[in-house]
Amino acid sequence: MEDFDKIYVDGVFVVAVNLTRSTLNEAIAFRKIVEEEINSGHTKLVIDLSKCDFIDSTFFGAIIMTLEMVTDKGYKLKVVKPAIKGEYIFTTTHTLRLFDIYKTREEAIKSFEEDIQSES
């Protein structure tokens, strides 16, 4: 299994992090993947962290940088909640409120459709 799966569903780019431990080594590859997708014009992005039991500060930094890139371009980012232990970094850094977090990938993808309906 690859460390990351790139999936496209209904115009939404999903990067699934298939790691129980997300650290510096994986942060570099993750950042490259999301930068390429954002720069190629994908305006809807989901980061699926559901398999992550541990997210270190460097990988978390890559997620924050992704949020900044997406926000700067007016794009949208949704996050699938990490495993209970992985959620620790979000709560200790008090950044949980910065993200649109969902329990499942399907809910995150569907939320883009709901965003469009609420804008109408």
Image: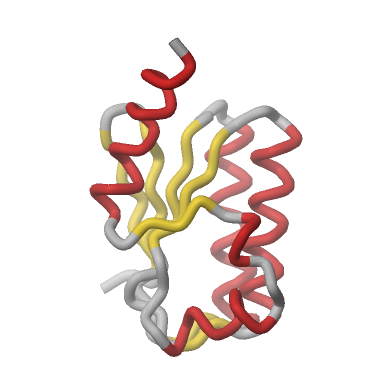
At which x and y percent is residue 33?
53, 52
Q: Is residue 19 left or right of residue 97?
A: left
Seen from the viewer's position, the closer of residues 23 and 99 is 99
Which residue does the image show at 71% across and 43% down from the upper left? 69
Q: Quadrant of residue 51?
A: bottom left
On screen, residue 8 above or below 65: above
Asked if residue 56 lies left or right of residue 15, the reply is: right
Residue 68: give x, y in percent of width and height.
Answer: 73, 47
Q: Which residue is at 47% across, 83% downward?
A: 86
Q: Is residue 73 left or right of residue 8?
A: right
Using the rendered view, name the quadrant where residue 74 is placed.
top right
Q: Is residue 44 above or below residue 69?
A: above
Q: Residue at x 64, y 81 (%)?
A: 24
**Image-quadrant location for residue 118:** top left
Looking at the rendering, in which quadrant would you find the C terminus? top left
Identify the residue at image location x=55%, y=75%. 26
